[in-house]
Image (cartoon, rainbow, N blue to C red):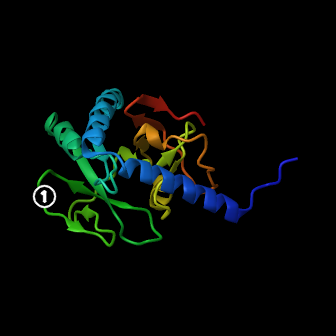
Amino acid sequence: MKEPQSDNHIVARRRALRNAALSAREALTVTARGALERRLEVHLADLLERLAPRRLAFCWPFRAEPDLRHFVARWLAQDASRLAALPVVTDREAPLAFRRWTPGMRLEPDRHGIPHPPTGEDVVPELVLVPLNAFDAAGFRLGYGGGYFDRTLAVLDALAVGVGYELGRVDTVLPQPHDRAMDWLVTEAGTFRATL
């Protein structure tokens, strides 16, 4: 009979999965990452066309995550009724807030150095593009360990679309009770419905 894994063992394995995915992603050249982003954007555009959100949240690229700024700017330009938003940490233990983003607007770095709108219109997104470090087919992901998206998705009535590169795909991220699965996963290889 297999021994149950201790909490410390699970935490260590999750940390190792996260670090391996981050290292692999950060090792990509700018050219290689750009090629992956272009392929990913094709699949993401198809999914957004099918789901047809009017209010979309996305993340400013951090640590070699897919850079979706130009993609979102093009998405906004296609329909004046669309809104885009960036996440804002208002309290480390609270769900994220989302503030309207427009291309070229003034942003300020947060405590992690990630640009965000310091003030502005709050937006309740219909769909959130969530960065993936390590992820599995069930739609579970590893972020950076702060739990921000898990807390947010627990209270937000929005579709969660994980966006990342196949190099982060693993058999399991060893999801914990607080983890929230993505509804969809989008990578350079295609669009996948999470298989919970």
Please determine whether, in this image, residue 29 is positioned above or below residue 100.
Answer: above
Residue at figure coordinates x 50%, y 48% from the top left = 134
Residue 34 figure quarter:
top left
Judged left or right of residue 114, residue 188 is right
Q: Position of residue 102 (x, y in %)?
A: 16, 51
Q: Which of the 4 quarters of the picture holds residue 39?
A: top left
Q: Is residue 179 left or right of residue 95?
A: right
Residue 29 is at least partly visible in this image: yes
What amino acid is labelled 1 in the image? Answer: Met
Which quarter shows the C terminus?
Answer: top right
Query: Residue at 42% of width from left, 45% of height from top?
Result: 158
Q: Is residue 176 left or right of residue 68?
A: right
Of 30 and 109, nearer the camera is 30
Q: Position of residue 23 (x, y in %)?
A: 43, 53
Q: Disc 1 designates what residue?
A: 105
Of residues 106 and 119, the one drawn nearer to the viewer in this rendering: 106
In the image as oriented, which residue stretches furthest toward the left? 104
Residue drawn 37% across the image and 33% down it: 188
Residue 11, x across and y down, in percent: 62, 61
* Residue 82 in view here: no
Q: Residues within 10 Å of mark 1 (few under 14, many from 20)?
A: few
